[in-house]
Amino acid sequence: MSSVRKVIMNYLKVKLFVFISLSVMLWAAAGNAADEPQDTAAAQTPKIEIKPADTETIRWFLPYEKPFRMTGFEWFETDRVYERLPVDKPETVTQYPNGKATSIPAASCGAFNLSPHTSGGQIQFRTDSAHIQVSGELSGQYRGDNISPLGSSAFALYYREGDSDTWVYAGASRFSHSKDEFSAQVGGTMTRKTRDCLLYFPTYCGVKSLAIGLDKDAVVEAPRPWKDPRKVIFYGTSITQGGCASHSGADAGALLSRDLDMPVLNYGFSGNGKGEPEIARMLASIKDPALYILDYEWNIITGEEMAASLTPFIDILRKDHPETPILVMSHTPGSFEGIDQDDDSLARFKAKREAMILEVQKRQAEGDKKIEFLDGNTLLGEDWWNCLVDGCHLSDFGFYRQEKVMLPVVQRMLKNSNK
């Protein structure tokens, strides 16, 4: 029995030694970890709240904090991300290939996938800073062959001085687009005088984080109030999104916003705004709409698809906003229209156009006095080919011409919306 007892006692001593040793090691590791400096920003702070440390010359700000005014992300307060549509999405959406309602997974809906593209996002403020800097991280940079990195992934700066209503382009951020992290000055060094500043987000990529750097001793004030704080909601295609403008302040939506001095929310989705009723409900939920612009024909294949999608889309808008004007637009001209086309292609474009006109005329006949059709063939002028980059998308000159034709129509409809 004594030999057995010795074996048991030795065994228990070994187990006790191992237990104590492991406990000491774990305690020591915990103590060392506690003593080591922790990267709490990376571990605990959402990317959207990260900004560089102030230096002797530069003070950093977050764009959604006062006195800055950020526009273009209607669900930011709840979602805390720079996205154009809400993060909370339905499981399925409805599209209308060949005119037949078809349910697809929301993950397959290109509009939701392009929602992180920050087209139309902008920040306004007043400052006398000589330098405007940006720092942060991008996501999903577009690397197509028809638009430069400056046009797709840069921040653009405009300014106006004194009592002037004229915004002047000051330049864009320039940094390496081989990686997503960026830090750069936007435009050149300016004289020290207080001016209104307007900073546009990129058009064809996402922004995970952004901080704005100003001279450390600079004045920073709230911007002038909008002349009209209601919202123009612009839904459409890659052209609506801003392709292929040279920078993010040159597309039609940005031009309209500056000329009207009111928010223009960009819901252009490259190849993917197809008149989904689920997205119509999201747009209808936006408060204080002044005008809806529907310009998504380029994303539609057939007349049947156009007719089947447009009717429920407008029905949804009208249910919540019976008096808000709606402008339905057909596509701008493309190079293919300068050459011979097969009869099927010509018939498809004619059918889509007729579907839009018939829908508008039907509603007008039923008493809707606040819906109109704008012919896209009138937007670029007789020499429309001088307005194109790749045969379809618009250059800065093309967007300028488009907006100058749209502007008086929009102004008249906005005036009518007040009646």
Image: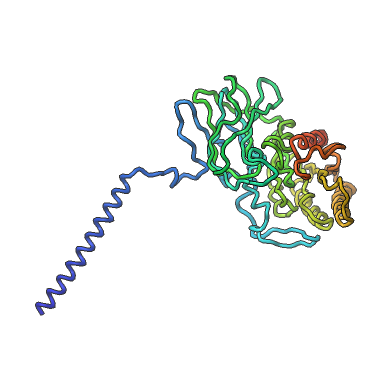
Viewer-proximal residue, 155 or 231? Answer: 155
Left or right relative to 369: residue 324 = left
Q: Is residue 245 above or below residue 144?
A: above
On-image quarter of the C terminus: top right
**Residue 147 in which image quadrant:** top right
Q: Is residue 328 visible?
A: no
Find residue 139 and report its horizontal and vertical position in percent.
Answer: 57, 46
Q: Residue furthest bottom?
A: 1
* Count of numbered tags: 0
Q: Is residue 91 visible?
A: yes
Find residue 233 and report its horizontal and vertical position in percent.
Answer: 72, 42
Q: Is residue 225 above or below residue 417?
A: above
**Residue 3 in which image quadrant:** bottom left
Q: Is residue 399 above or below residue 345?
A: above
Viewer-proximal residue, 232 or 143? Answer: 143
Left or right relative to 12: residue 213 = right
Which colouring convention does the figure follow?
rainbow
Residue at 75 percent across and 41 percent down: it is 389
Find residue 380 and report its horizontal and vertical position in percent.
Answer: 82, 38
On-image quarter of the N terminus: bottom left
Find residue 47 and report its horizontal and vertical position in percent.
Answer: 51, 44
Residue at 74 percent across and 62 percent down: it is 102
